[in-house]
Image (cartoon, rainbow, N blue to C red):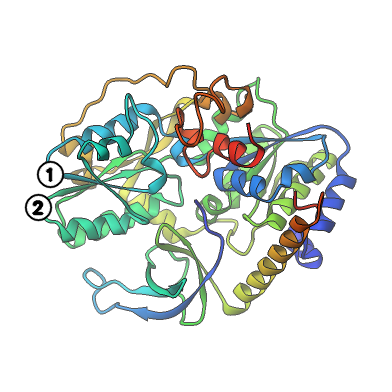
Amino acid sequence: MKCVDEFRSREITAPLVAEIARSVQRPMRIMEVCGTHTMSIFRHGIRSLLPKEISLLSGPGCPVCVTPVSHIDAFLAAADLDQVTIATFGDLIRVPGTGRSLAGARAQGARVEIVYSPMDALTLAQREPERTVVFPAIGFETTAPAIGATILAAERQGIGNFLIIGANKTMPQALEALMGDPELKVDGLLCPGHVSAIIGAAAYRPVAERYRLACAVAGFEPADILAGLLSLIRQINKGRPGVENCYTRAVSEEGNLRAQHLIDQVFEPADSAWRGLGIIPGSGLVLREKYRFFDGMEQLGIAVPTAREPKGCRCGEILKGRMLPPECPLYGTACTPLQPVGPCMVSNEGTCAAYYRYSGV
Amino acid sequence: MCLAIPMQVVALEGGSDEMLDPQVALVANEGVLTAIRLEMADRIPAVGEYVIIHAGFAIRTLTTEEAEYNLSLMRRMAEMVERDDQQPGGVGR
């Protein structure tokens, strides 16, 4: 609650910036885990407001960016099938797979529709019973329950022409894997707002304790982010890292139990491949046996070979916080938002796209 | 993309049959009424209350007081950022 009180009494960003400048006593490396945080930090020029002692690293919290090439290839393989419509979130459509993207497949005649919600994909399936609608199920704990609820709705309404290709991922396991990397020295984590709304602030306690890591859950407005950073700086100064919730208007200690139940009802944990991070045990969600009927890979008989990352693309290193976009040889030359090579340049939440848009080449 | 802006519920619809006609909340999104699913909401909102939305689903219900306070704060912050942006070398850059 400490954070919220401060947030309320200050109300505006300038005093927070001043307080941050006063509080920083030594160099600190802070990772913002969530892609929406990355974008908000750039859009509001927050980097330029911070003392030089603070290094902000972007983490693995952009769903499109961490989806490996082989998954994109699976979506493409489905798109090539007769009578299949791909209904996808918009930022996935331009991500290159091996050779082309879903946008490319659409140009070649595949049916690829952009939807805002998995429920819109289900509505499309109802409207066009002669086609099979496949939803590429990417996203973290905030999106997984929405997909779970959509599967339950499809089951209850007996809609048989709706399938998903599962690529959902869970954040705590990825953070464990990242923080266990001795080369990545991070003092604090700015924890994602809406993933935390589902899993609860308590979900970060194990990683905070194991790695003596300061954690602050923050919302997306400039003052939210600054309040989160200030909380981290103070925890680091005191040498007493823990988990502080600076986004109490959306996040509780235990999270959203209804949403957690939806995930648990439809999915079970499985090992999952992350772009750049490799296979992380227990970090993915797959359909439970009871709902395998909705598994697009199984129903459509899709199998894709292991795929290579695009040549020269350093998205993997960038997602691990080991490299900044301008250090990538392709950044701004071979890879631009108009002609992206890697997903970090495609997505609105991608670190490279944020760098390119707001700091130039 | 996570949208943090709470939207006000203007009506509740459906609910006659949990399976075939689930209850949804209508919110006004730039003048267009949009149906928001409530399966994931931490509690069902009343008309006039606000919801935080992700991918067409409400993930958190806010009382009118909570939401209006948050919205006024966001508006003030936006004004601050805009003002700073207009000044050369202002803190918004």
Q: Secondary structure at mark 1?
A: loop
Question: Residue at image x 38%, y 31%?
Answer: A96
| Quadrant in the picture for residue A324 | top right
| Relative depth, front residue between A55 and A4 | A55
Please say whether residue A290 is visible from this viewpoint: no
A84 shown above or below B79: above
Residue at image coords 38%, 70%? B34
Which element carries disc 2, helix, strand or loop? loop
Q: Quadrant of residue A34?
A: top right
Amino acid type shown at disc 2: Glu
| Residues beneath discs 1 and 2 located on the same chain | yes
Between disc 1 and disc 2, whose residue precedes?
A: 1
Q: Please report, as a chain letter, where disc 1 is located.
A: A
Residue B28 position within the rendered picture, expressed as x and y whole percent measured from the top left: 45, 75
Residue A246 at x, y = what percent?
A: 68, 56
Residue A361 % position (x, y): 63, 31
A270 sits to left or right of A327? left
Report whether B60 appears left or right of B71: left
Mark sitting on residue A130: 2
Evaluate whether residue B77 shows in this view. Answer: yes
CB atoms of marks 1 and 2 within 8 Å = yes
Q: Which one is nearer the viewer's eye here, A139 or B27? A: B27
Q: Is residue B74 left or right of residue B87?
A: left
Mark 1 residue type: Gln
**Which residue is labeled 1 in the image?**
A83
The answer to whether A64 is drawn above or below residue A37 in the figure is: above
- Residue drawn at 77 percent across, 65 percent down: A11
Label 1 – label 2 distance at C-alpha: 7 Å
- The image quadrant of residue A50 is top right
